[in-house]
């Protein structure tokens, strides 16, 4: 069982910045694909950014150029730096860890989520 714990959410004004952190347990963290997802009220959960074990990143069009995902394998932690925040970024942000089990098989783990509110 892998534990995934997010932190760093809060209230920020439009144009401001926040950095989310996500710590995942396990001795093979460097092999996890990690991702940030978000869910706004009344909407489906959507992918925000992902980072593979090799460091390849992918972003939703809505956050490209504003958000940056990174990882520190020594700390078993992935980050989401969010700049130029907009009210539309308001959501619960979830961290996801895709953990390899055997070749061709992986298991997905979710954190409990952290609220990000962008409002003046």
Image: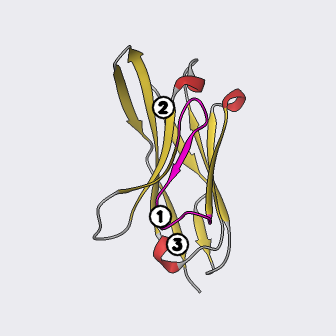
- Dot 3: element: strand
Res. 106 mark: none
Residue 110, quarter of picture: top left
Q: Position of residue 36 (x, y in %)?
A: 49, 50
Image quarter of the C terminus: bottom right
| Residue 1 visible in image | no
Q: Which residues are magenta?
A: 51-66
| Residue 97 visible in image | yes
Q: Which residue is mark 3?
A: 117
Q: Which residue is mark 2?
A: 3
- Distance in Å between CA atoms under marks 2 and 1: 29 Å
Closer to the camera: disc 1 or disc 3? 1
- Number of marks drawn: 3
Q: Position of residue 78 (x, y in %)?
A: 61, 41
Q: Is residue 59 magenta?
A: yes
What predominant SS class does the magenta segment belong to? loop
Residues at discs 2 and 1 in contact (Cβ within 8 Å): no
In the picture shown, does residue 14 fall above or below 78? below
Q: Position of residue 63 (x, y in %)?
A: 53, 65
Q: Which residue is mark 1?
A: 61
Residue 111, quarter of picture: top left
Label 3 Cα neighbours within 10 Å, binned few <14 / some 14-19 / many ≥20: many
Residue found at the far bottom of this picture: 120
- Dot 1: element: loop
Image quarter of the N terminus: top left
In primary-sequence order, the first of circles 1 and 3 is: 1
Residue shown at the point (60%, 25%) measured from the top left: 30
- Distance in Å between CA atoms under marks 2 and 3: 25 Å
């Amino acid at each position: 069982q892998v534990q995934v714990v997010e932190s760093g959410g809060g209230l920020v004004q439009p144009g401001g910045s926040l950095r989310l952190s996500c710590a995942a347990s396990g001795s093979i963290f460097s092999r996890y694909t990690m991702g940030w997802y978000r869910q706004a009220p009344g909407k489906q959960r959507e992918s925000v950014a992902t980072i593979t074990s090799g460091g390849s990143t992918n972003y939703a069009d809505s956050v490209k150029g504003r958000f940056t995902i990174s990882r520190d394998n020594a700390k078993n932690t992935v980050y989401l730096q969010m700049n130029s925040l907009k009210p539309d970024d308001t959501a619960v942000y979830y961290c996801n860890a895709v953990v390899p089990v055997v070749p061709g098989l992986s298991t997905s783990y979710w954190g409990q989520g952290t609220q990000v509110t962008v409002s003046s």
